[in-house]
Image (cartoon, rainbow, N blue to C red):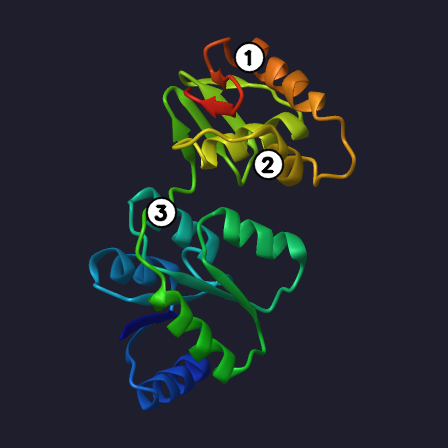
Amino acid sequence: MRVLVVDDERGLTRTLQRGLAAEGFAVDCAHDGESGLSLATHGDYDAIVLDIMLPRLNGYDVVAALRKRSVWTPVIMLSAKDGEYDVADALDLGADDYLTKPFSFVVLVARLRALVRRPAEARPAVLSVGALELDPSTRSVTRGGELVALTTREVALLEYLMRHASRVVGKLELLDHVWDGDGEDPNVVEVYVGYLRRKLGRDTVMTVRGAGYRVVG
């Protein structure tokens, strides 16, 4: 298994390189974001271990650039920060996992192996269905290139529909995942679908009678 480690702490990268090599990994290292991005873009890696605080280009920008270039190599982000928003930002931009420094080497190895076992698939950071685009990291929505102002709940509903655009999504499923199923009247789904249609166009969300909804963009 070939792994790229991108971190400006040279002592840490040397330690990881030795430790991962002992576990059977082939390891390349980079010590700044630009070098890491170049290697990750052109190298054939099974996984990337990427620090957030890097010179020349930070880890957030590196993973966002990789996903924009349709490079879907699994990424584990490393950071001394442990705030929930730091984790959310990393995952929204396209990272697959997150470890806070100091971390367990045993856990890192286990997570690398778990990531590589997953089937490779395209996971665009920006969702796109027809003329619709939704960026989960900024919660911004455009249709035909024009920005559309949506409420937090409207964005959550649209995001869930777009993530499951290949199928019809039932009303109860939407209640569970968008409203947490906390005793809401099922009719609230119809109300919010109506809001989306008014703001994005009546042809944006299709009703499949007796089954649910499907976003068509």
Tag 1's secondary structure?
helix
Identify which residue, 30 or 101, lies in the foreground. 101
Mark 3 to mark 2 CA distance (whole Å): 29 Å
In the rendered image, residue 36, in percent from the top left (x then y), is placed at: 33, 62
Q: Nearer the viewer, mark 2 or mark 1?
A: 2
Left or right of 170? Residue 51 is: left
Q: Which mark is residue 173?
A: 2
Please state which amino acid type lies under the numbered disc 1: Arg
**For this view, does 45 lie left or right of residue 207?**
left
Q: Is residue 9 visible?
A: no
Q: CA distance from mark 2 to mark 1?
A: 20 Å
In this orientation, which residue lies closer to the viewer: 194 or 145? Answer: 194
Dot 2 surroundings within 10 Å: few (below 14), some, or many (20 or more)?
some
- For this rendering, which residue is in front, 170 or 123? 170
Disc number placed over residue 197 in the picture, else none: 1
- Residue 41 visible in rendering: yes
Image quadrant in which you'd find residue 19 = bottom left
Can you give x and y, in whole percent of width and height, for residue 146 in the image?
46, 16
Question: Counting residues from the N terminus, which is met first, the one under dot 2 or under dot 1?
Answer: 2
**Residue that sits furthest to the right in the current view:** 183
Q: Position of residue 173 (x, y in %)?
A: 59, 36
Kind of residue indicated by mark 3: Arg
**What residue did someone put label 3 on?**
67
